[in-house]
Image (cartoon, rainbow, N blue to C red):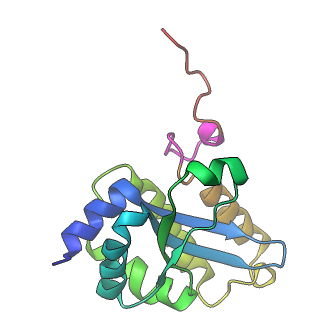
């Protein structure tokens, strides 16, 4: 039985919140979990739990030699913006991530709030678009502060 706590933990370890600013003026928010081929049924159960999104075979783009030895992977993905706004963001606001991924989720949720019903970048002010860009740039990195160095998490990092 899949529970909210299980999904939170699974997302902390294997999930991703992603924002794309496309050249066709669209801002796309995505939530996804990638798993090996033998965990597809688990992704199907997560999809049933949420009632949104879909599970698909991940496209292998690394060349013929790599693909020959690589097992297929599956992805549970939510890309429909209404589902992000009405299901994914409220779920993770009510069921808090415990690991570092909560920093990326908080930025993802701020972007979702900002662009709600306005995923076309031409509908955003210059200030709003800059805020989306800044938040996006600082997601899914080791430095969660939003500082300029967040784009390069190894700045001032030295080997001992």
- Between 70 and 20, the one lying in front of the other is 70
**Residue 35 relative to residue 19: left or right:** left
Magenta stretch in the rendered image: 141-151
Residue extending furthest toward the left: 1
Q: Quadrant of the N terminus?
A: bottom left
Q: Is residue 3 above or below residue 139?
A: below
Tell me the residue at 55%/15% (across/down).
158
Q: Is residue 116 visible?
A: yes
Tell me the residue at 81%/82% (across/down).
122
Q: Position of residue 88 (x, y in %)?
A: 41, 79
Tell me the residue at 43%/65% (across/down).
37
- Between 140 and 119, the one lying in front of the other is 140
- Between 36 and 87, the one lying in front of the other is 36
* In magenta segment, residue 150: yes
Tell me the residue at 52%/91% (across/down).
82
Q: Is residue 62 above or below residue 157?
A: below
**Residue 89 relative to residue 79: left or right:** left
Q: Position of residue 3 (x, y in %)?
A: 19, 76
**Residue 14 relative to residue 152: left or right:** left
Q: Is residue 96 visible?
A: no
Q: Position of residue 26 (x, y in %)?
A: 75, 79
């Amino acid at each position: 039985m899949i529970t909210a706590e299980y999904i939170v933990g699974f997302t902390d370890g294997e999930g991703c919140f992603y924002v794309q600013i496309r050249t066709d003026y669209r801002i796309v928010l995505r939530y996804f979990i990638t798993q090996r081929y033998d965990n597809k049924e688990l992704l199907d159960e997560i999809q049933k739990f949420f009632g949104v999104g879909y599970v698909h075979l991940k496209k292998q783009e690394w060349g013929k030699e790599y693909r020959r030895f690589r097992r297929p992977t599956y992805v549970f993905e939510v890309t429909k913006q209404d589902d992000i706004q009405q299901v994914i963001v409220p779920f993770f606001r009510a069921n808090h991530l415990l690991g570092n991924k909560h920093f990326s989720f908080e930025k993802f949720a701020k972007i979702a709030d900002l662009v709600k019903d306005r995923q076309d970048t031409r509908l955003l002010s210059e200030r709003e678009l800059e805020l989306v860009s800044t938040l996006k740039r600082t997601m899914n990195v080791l430095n969660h502060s939003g500082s300029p160095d967040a784009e390069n998490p190894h700045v001032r990092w030295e080997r001992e």
